[in-house]
Image (cartoon, coloured by chain):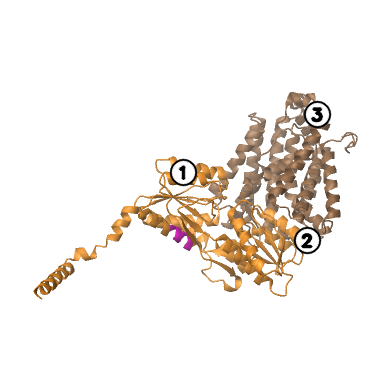
Chain colours: A brown, B orange
Amino acid sequence: MNATGWPNWRRLNQEGIVFAIAILLFAAAALGLPGFLTADNLVAIVRSVSVLGILALGMAVVIIGRGIDLSAVAIMAMSVAWYLQLLNTGTSDGLAFVYVLAGVLAIGLLNGFLVAYADVPAIFVTLATGSFVFGYVRSQLITQDAVPVPGGHWVELLGGIRFLDIPIEVFVFAGLAFLVFLFLRYTKWGRFIYFAGDNPVAARNIGVPVRPMLVLRYVLSAFVALIAGLLTAASLHSINTRIVNSTLLYDIVLVAVIGGIGLSGGRGGVRNVLVGAALIGILLNAMTIIDIPLLYQNLIKAAILLGAIIVDGIINPRDEQTAQQGDI
Amino acid sequence: MKLLRTLMAAATALAVTAFVAPSFAADDPGPAAYAKSLNGKRVMLVPLAMGFDLAQGWAHYLKKEVEAWGGTFETRDPNWVVDAGAQAITDAIASDTRPDVLIIHAPDLNSYSKLMKKAQAAGTYVLLVDNPANFPADAFVGSDWDKLGQLEAEAAIKGCGENSSKKIGLVQGDQANSSSLYQYAGIMKVLEKHPDFQVVAKPDSNWDATTSRNVTTTMLQQHPDICSIIDFWDGDATGASAAIRDAKLDGKVFLVTTGGGEKAADCDKLVDGTYGAVVMTDLARQSGDMNAIIKFLLQSGQPAGTSHTYIYTLEKATTKADLKPDSCWDLKALQAEAAAK
């Protein structure tokens, strides 16, 4: 990547490779599949990856700062499940929302505090808090896996909002992507995230508040997860906590990493998330139109992702710096 | 003649004695034998998870009965994780308080086969509930999924009507779970008899509502004239219904699904028109069947693993038109009842 932020095509990186694959797939599907290149289908593609993309934005911010948040899906599902449960049992909307916001903030702070000040590796902290959030909410606060949205509630109305026939998720995804882009590129703290992710010790030596910023990233990630959960409930009129057991978490990491955000931190940005989400969205949509069974879908998805990683490994061999620090 | 007279006299005497001795007449040997065989017996339910309507309903009805006949009833919650279920079964077999009856809700055709064999070898009767498996359990209690699929297909055909596009879309579960595989087989059987109807797409939801929504959205865009969709479980059919709603095809696409007949999950959604028809399992009766076979096995004296009974629950496709007040059971009411105790 050069200074202007556009890919340098002479030195193709993973983002470029994945982008090229996405374009190829798109072209092939547009030519070969009837009904692929319609406005409705294109909107459906973006919509199908909106929630995934929103979660990946939160994950990207954490990964760029050389961390990872494995509690994202648990926070997403359980915060909203608890919120809806509170509403269903008669708690007033305002109070219920305050409880949930406080809970989400607390988990984000706990994640950040344990990683930043107790020096526990992020992968263990967030794995544990994710399990804790799921276990506690599932066993103590809600009575069953699926919690419905009360009829006529604003979450239900949110799901019905359309501008130009485009569902609200798409706008929220676009808006959040733009905000995160502005944050990472044009704010002081956004730039600091790259410094801290690239070399935390050096960042600290030049006076970057590395630890408070770490906490901030996990809090941000938790709030992004809450937004993703609310949008899911808005569309389905219920939230099913079973999603915590699904492969969604890996898909989030995948979208970020496949787009070219290195797990060693300090690299990548919003564009990488968009490229990763585009590939996954086009791939899944095309396979659904062709009516490929789920087993083969997973196989094809995995093969393409593996291929992209291998090609990246050949074109961009691990450098001295990564070899010394290691990935997470 | 003398002999006859003597015999008659003896018979009369005997009859009178029998009639007079009240303790003999009132003493039905049944309850004592029943209590002897059943008292203190342990029944354990290992569903796919405790957090959904079927498992909570079974647990409610079973607990009530088992405790009434002096047994103990326990559940384990693997929370949809196959390994956790295997661990729960292994622990149960090895523990000092090994259950006498193990009720297993199998996640797929094969995962627990070895463990169930082990349980039977240890002397525990194994009941399979809801999902069949490749294992000769002492009894299978649940849906005949093939038949259930046939009912769904018939409901879909009826929902479409004669003057429709006759295009049907399926949202399958996955390609491993017996309930999904057999349901598909049943649907196809009926559609073979109606060659004018065709399945235009059959994606999998992997039992996830968001996936169901995404695949249904694509399906409706490719075939906007679909007249009916069959989603293989009410747990994810909320996704298919969201896609239909988003495509503004409410009332035009007849959504058929299947479920445990819980009020909020099924009947309420028939009333508000989300679902066109639901093939519902009569959960109270299914739990009753389980209870009956448990009581039979425990009294039979026959060793575990020697009987192989199939008890299929009566299924019925219910539409808004034939809803009755007792068509569904109410999980909230059961929970309130449990909390009141």
> Under tag 1, what secondary structure?
helix
- Left or right of A175 on screen, residue B273: left
Q: Residues within 10 Å of mark 3 (few under 14, many from 20)?
A: few
- Residue located beneath label 2 in the image: B222
Asked whether the viewer can see residue A327, the reply is: yes
Q: Residues within 10 Å of mark 2 (few under 14, many from 20)?
A: some
- In the picture, the disc for residue B264 is none
> Under tag 2, what secondary structure?
helix
Q: Nearer the viewer, mark 1 or mark 3?
A: 1
Badge 2 sits on which subunit? B
- Residue located beneath label 1 in the image: B118
Asked if the residue at tag 3 contacts the one at tag 1, i.e. Cβ–Cβ closer than 8 Å, the answer is: no
- Residue located beneath label 3 in the image: A317
Residue A48 image offset from top left, x and y in percent = 75, 52
Quadrant of the image containing the C terminus of chain A: top right
Is residue B236 highlighted in magenta?
no
Give the residue type that dot 2 points to.
Gln
Give the residue type that dot 1 points to.
Lys
Q: Which residues are magenta?
A: B285-291
- Left or right of A124 on screen, residue A256: right
Is residue B289 highlighted in magenta?
yes
Residue B10 vs A209, above or below: the answer is: below
The mark that comes first in sequence, 2 or 1, is: 1
**Which image quadrant for residue A109?**
top right
